[in-house]
C-alpha cells in the first residue's frame, strides 16, 4: 500500500475518520498531520504526549519487543497504572501485530497472577514489581515515568534479561519496513477478561479492525473534531476507556486528558483549565457532579457528557442537566462489542431512560421462544456486527452465540416505535417472587427519587415459601457509619412510604438497609453478587412487617 501526500491530506487529516488505515498507519500519519498537537495529557501534571512523540515512542517500544524476541501475534499483558505509559505500550503492542491484554495494575498480587494465568501472555509489561508467585517473563518500567522511550542501554539490558542470545539481533527498522512491514500489517488486537461476577471469567479477543471500526463509529456519532478535547478518568484496562477514549481520539486527531481516577474536588476548575469539550463518564460520576457547589462554575465549552457502563437513572440525568446545563448522552455497550452498542443522538431526540439507537451494530430484542419481540415488549437483547466478537476464547461461553452470529447479551430491554432501546435490567437480576417476576430498576427508580439517597440497589433475598423477595440497600448522604445512623431513619422511612404508594404490594421491598457504600468495580458498576451474598453490614435497617 502506497501512502501518498493525498492520503495524508484526505484520509487522515485532523478530524477525518481515516477509514481503511491500520493503527500503525494512523499513528505514523498523525505524526505528519498533527505532530505538535497533544494526543494525551495527564490531568495531574504537565506531562503529555504529542502525536509526533507518540510515533517515536510507539516505534521504539515495537523495536524493543522484537529485540526481546516477543513473537508476532503473541499476547503481551499490560499492568501499567500510569495512564500515559499505558497509552504508549497499549498502542505499540497492537500496532506491531501483537495482542494487548490489559489488566488492573492496582490489583493484589494473587488477583494479578490469576489474571495472567487466564491470559497466558508471552511477557508482561508493568510499572510494579512482579508477584513472587509469577514465574513468567516480566518487564518492569519505572512508575509515573516521564520519558516513555526506554534508553538504549536499558533496551540492551532488558533484551539480555529476556533470555535472548547474548548479542540480541539488530532491529531492521528502515523507514520502508516500518511503514509497510509487519508493524503496519493491521494484525493483533486486544484480549480481555470479563469481570467474572457471574462465574468463570469470559476470555475474548477483539481484532484491531474491530477496535478501529468501533472507534470510528463512536467518533462519527459524537461528531468529534480536531479541536475537541476529551476527559476520561475511567480505568484504561477496560474497553470503554481504550476505545471511546484512546482510539476514538486517535482516529479523530483530537486530544484526550486522562486521569488515573475520578476526583470530585476541583473537577469543574480542571475542565475549564484544560478546555475540555466532552466528558466520558459513568452514572456514579454523573450523580456526584450533579451537586454543583455555590463557588463552582461549569465551563460553557463542554458539549456533552457521555454516560456508559451501567443504567443511568432518569432522576440522576435530570438533576445533572438542570444543575449544569450540559446534555447527557446515555449509551449502552459491552466488551464483546468493542464498547458502544447504542447511543442517544447528539443532535436529535434524546430520550431519558433510553440508551438510544444502534450504532455500527445490528440489534434485535427476542422473546423467550426466540422470536422477535413486538414493539414495547421486553425481551433479551441480541447483537451482531463487524465490531462484535464471533466466539470466545473460553469455549464454554460460546453457547451464547448462535450459528448466525447473534450474541445473546443477557440484557433485558425493549425497542420503541422509533427504534430506541430501553434497558430494564439483566436476566440474572430478575427477582422471582412466587412466580411474579420483577426488575430491580423499577424499585430503584422510586428509591432514588429522594435527593438524600445517593445510591440504591434492589436485590432478591431468598425466601422459604416465595423463593425470593425484594430487599433494598440505600446510601444516605452524610450517613457513613453507626455514629451517624440517626440520620438514616427519616430518609429510610420516606423511602418505605414512597414505595408503598407507588409500587404494587409484590414489588415493595420487605426490608430497607442503609449502608455506608455499595460494592463497586473499577468502572463504578455496582457488584450485585456481593450484595446478594449478605456480606454488607447495614448501618440502619427497617424491616416491613
Image (cartoon, grey):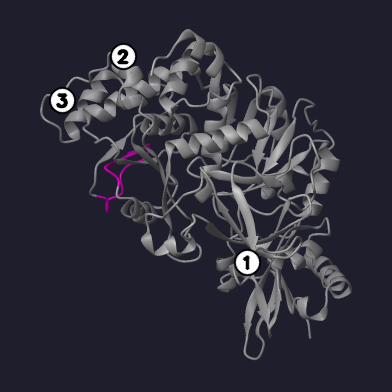
- Distance, label 2 to label 3, CA atoms, is 22 Å
Question: Residue lying furthest top in this view?
Answer: 5
What's the mark number on residue 176? 2
Task: From the image, give the main secondary structure of the stretch colored magenta.
Answer: loop
Tell me the quarter of the picture where residue 4 sits.
top left
* Residue that numbered label 1 is attached to: 371
Per the image, the residue denoted by label 3 is 168
Q: Describe the element under mark 3 as helix, strand or loop.
A: loop
Residue 194, percent across and down? 47, 55
Please tell me how many numbered marks the rendered image carries: 3
Distance between mark 3 and mark 1 Cα atoms: 60 Å
Q: What residue occupies the far left of the structure in this picture?
A: 166
381 relative to 354 in the view: left or right: left
376 inside magenta stretch:
no
In the rendered view, would you say 460 is above or below 192? below
Q: Residue at x 44, y 28 (%)?
A: 23
Q: Quadrant of the C terminus?
A: bottom right
Q: Inspect this view and state whether residue 287 appears.
A: yes
- Give the residues in magenta: 121-134
- Give x and y (percent) for residue 469: 69, 80
The tag earlier along the polypeptide, 2 or 3, is 3
Amino acid at each position: 500500500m502506497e501512502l501518498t501526500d493525498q492520503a495524508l491530506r484526505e484520509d487522515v487529516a485532523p478530524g477525518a475518520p481515516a477509514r481503511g488505515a491500520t493503527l500503525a498507519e494512523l499513528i505514523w500519519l498523525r505524526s505528519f498531520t498533527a505532530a505538535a498537537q497533544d494526543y494525551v495529557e495527564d490531568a495531574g501534571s504537565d506531562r503529555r504526549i504529542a502525536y509526533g512523540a507518540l510515533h517515536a515512542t510507539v516505534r521504539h517500544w515495537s523495536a524493543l519487543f522484537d529485540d526481546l524476541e516477543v513473537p508476532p501475534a503473541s499476547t503481551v499483558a499490560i499492568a501499567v497504572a500510569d495512564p500515559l505509559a499505558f497509552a504508549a505500550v497499549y498502542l505499540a503492542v497492537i500496532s506491531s501485530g501483537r495482542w494487548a491484554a490489559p489488566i488492573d495494575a492496582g490489583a493484589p498480587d494473587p488477583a494479578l497472577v490469576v489474571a495472567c494465568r487466564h491470559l497466558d501472555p508471552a511477557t508482561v509489561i508493568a510499572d510494579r514489581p512482579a508477584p513472587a508467585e509469577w514465574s513468567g517473563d516480566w518487564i518492569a518500567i519505572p512508575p509515573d515515568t516521564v520519558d516513555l522511550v526506554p534508553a538504549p542501554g536499558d533496551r540492551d539490558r532488558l533484551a539480555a534479561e529476556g533470555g535472548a542470545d547474548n548479542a540480541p539481533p539488530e532491529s531492521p527498522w528502515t523507514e520502508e519496513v516500518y511503514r509497510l512491514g509487519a508493524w503496519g500489517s493491521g494484525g493483533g488486537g486486544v484480549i480481555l477478561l470479563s469481570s467474572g461476577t457471574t462465574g468463570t471469567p469470559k476470555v475474548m479477543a477483539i481484532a484491531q479492525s474491530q477496535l478501529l471500526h468501533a472507534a470510528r463509529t463512536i467518533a462519527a456519532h459524537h461528531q468529534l473534531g480536531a479541536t475537541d478535547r476529551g476527559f476520561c478518568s475511567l480505568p484504561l484496562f477496560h474497553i470503554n476507556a481504550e476505545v471511546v477514549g484512546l482510539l476514538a481520539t486517535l482516529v479523530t486527531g483530537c486530544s484526550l486528558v486522562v486521569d488515573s481516577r475520578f476526583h470530585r474536588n476541583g473537577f469543574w476548575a480542571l475542565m475549564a483549565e484544560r478546555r475540555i469539550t466532552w466528558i466520558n463518564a459513568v452514572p456514579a460520576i454523573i450523580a456526584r457532579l450533579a451537586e454543583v457547589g455555590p463557588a463552582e462554575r461549569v465551563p460553557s465549552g463542554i458539549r456533552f457528557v457521555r454516560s456508559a457502563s451501567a443504567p443511568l437513572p432518569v432522576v440522576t440525568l435530570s438533576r445533572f442537566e438542570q444543575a449544569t446545563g450540559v446534555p447527557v448522552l446515555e449509551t449502552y455497550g459491552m466488551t464483546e462489542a468493542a464498547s458502544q452498542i447504542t447511543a442517544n443522538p447528539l443532535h436529535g431526540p434524546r430520550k431519558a431512560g433510553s440508551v438510544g439507537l444502534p450504532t455500527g451494530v445490528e440489534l434485535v430484542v427476542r422473546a423467550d421462544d426466540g422470536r422477535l419481540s413486538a414493539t414495547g415488549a421486553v425481551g433479551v437483547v441480541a447483537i451482531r456486527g463487524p465490531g462484535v466478537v464471533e466466539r470466545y476464547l473460553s469455549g464454554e461461553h460460546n453457547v451464547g452465540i448462535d450459528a448466525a452470529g447473534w450474541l445473546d447479551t443477557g440484557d433485558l430491554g425493549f425497542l420503541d416505535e422509533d427504534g430506541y432501546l430501553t434497558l430494564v435490567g439483566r436476566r440474572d437480576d430478575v427477582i422471582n417472587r412466587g412466580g411474579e417476576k420483577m426488575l430491580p430498576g423499577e424499585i430503584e427508580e422510586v428509591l432514588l427519587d429522594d435527593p438524600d439517597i445517593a445510591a440504591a440497589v434492589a436485590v432478591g433475598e431468598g425466601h422459604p415459601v416465595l423463593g425470593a423477595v425484594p430487599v433494598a440497600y440505600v446510601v444516605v448522604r452524610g450517613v457513613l457509619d453507626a455514629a451517624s445512623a440517626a440520620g438514616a431513619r427519616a430518609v429510610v422511612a420516606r423511602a418505605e412510604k414512597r414505595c408503598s404508594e407507588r409500587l404494587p404490594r409484590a414489588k415493595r421491598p420487605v426490608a430497607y438497609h442503609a449502608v455506608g457504600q455499595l460494592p463497586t468495580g473499577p468502572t463504578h458498576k455496582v457488584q450485585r453478587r456481593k450484595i446478594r451474598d449478605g456480606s454488607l453490614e447495614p448501618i440502619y435497617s427497617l424491616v416491613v412487617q
